[in-house]
Image (cartoon, rainbow, N blue to C red):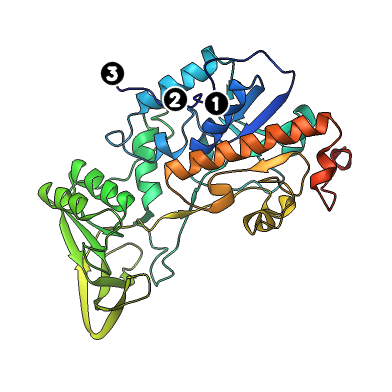
Amino acid sequence: MPHPMNFAFAGPGPARPNGKAVAIIGAGPSGLSAAGFLACLGYKVDVYDKLPQPGGLMVFGIPADRIPAERIAQSVATLTERYGVRFHPCTKVCDDTLATDTGDDFSTQCISLEQLVREHDAVILCTGSWKPRKLCIEGEDLPGVYTGLAFLFPIRAASYNKAAMQGIEVAGKNVVVIGAGFSAVDVGHGALGQGAKRVSLIYRRTRREAPCGAHEIEQFEAAGGQWMELVTPLRILGQGKVEGIECIQCHLGPPDADGRRSAIPDSCAKVVLPADIVVTAIGETAAPPFAAKLGLESVRKNEIHWLQMTRMEGVFVAGDALSGPSKIGKAIYSGLRAAQSLSRWLTLKAMNRETEYREEPPIRREELR
């Protein structure tokens, strides 16, 4: 059995209840680490997430051979059974402008941020990166073009609700994957495993510069995939559906100050690849709810008077919602910092000393009523 993750490592065990309640929006790595930290200090913690199972993209975006879902499920069970953390799955925290990101189909109820603020002493926003990046090339909106997350999510989510998840049919088809990160490689392996006729991974630099590393590419090739480097997509071809992708060959320029070499297109060297399906696995961006209301841009610029607190009193932010897409370890660290800052703020607030650290008044809770 895989060794479980431990999100409650801040203390030796559950602490005596301190009478304070905290709501956490998002059950990804930053949300789980914040929940574990606060539970160790005796807080009553409620975690809200739009998906049916805690873990975020660790469960619904990353293949099980990288992070077994059992490890996360065991850690969640520990938080629930030993530390009293309450999880509210399939619950979207939203306002009047409901977004339609990947995974929202699982949400069966909606709760407002204002309600959470009224019912808890503090709130932490820990939503992840669910908005795909765009290539901004001709043909990107054709049927048969998918994002990396749109391809991978149904594979993982089907085990929770197969009827609601319609996977992408790739058997016997030519699949072109754009990108060279772990998501791109995972898409490539997924397409090969589902019987694709040919799977090509294209990248504008070489395998030496690939974010996933040369070893992952070698494994992809060993599984039957085709690696194509120094090519970048110009446009996706087709009438009513994907029929191919036109690319331009590149060469690498001299390294910059950071040692990174830019891909320079060769205008006369074009190539057309046959394709029935194109997957743009070039990453996602964070699109946190209430960004303007909470003044998240000011938090990112550190134009704040309390670590990771937004301009709404008692509402903190962590993880991708704060810094954009990041590695799991960085998201966990961000969640811990937000939880620690929150705890210190509540402690000083109980002594009527929190204003010592604030120069401008945040939005008061009374304004929400």
Residue at which label 3 appears: 1
Does 82 sit above or below residue 324? Answer: above
Q: CA distance from mark 1 to mark 2?
A: 8 Å
Determine which residue is flagged by label 2: 6
Q: Seen in the image, is 8 located left or right of residue 43?
A: left
Disc 2, SS: loop
> Are discs 1 and 2 less than 8 Å apart at CB?
yes
Q: Which residue, given by chain and number where applicable, does mark 1 sit on?
A: 36
* Image: 160 above or below 172: above
Q: Nearer the viewer, mark 2 or mark 3?
A: 2
- Check disc 3 and report its element: helix, strand or loop: loop
Mark 3 surroundings within 10 Å by alpha-carbon count, few (fewer than 14), some (14 through 19), many (20 or more): few
Residue 108 is left or right of residue 281, and the answer is right
Element marked by disc 1? helix
Q: Residue 43: x, y in percent?
A: 67, 22
Q: Nearer the viewer, residue 60 or 330?
A: 330
Q: Position of residue 256 (x, y in %)?
A: 35, 76
Q: CA distance from mark 2 to mark 3?
A: 15 Å
- Residues packed near mark 2 inside 10 Å, few (<14), some (14 to 19) or many (20 plus): some
Q: Residue at x 44, y 22 (%)?
A: 75
Which residue lies at the image location 41% right of the left edge and 66% below the top edge? 135
- Residue 271 location in percent, x, y? 20, 76
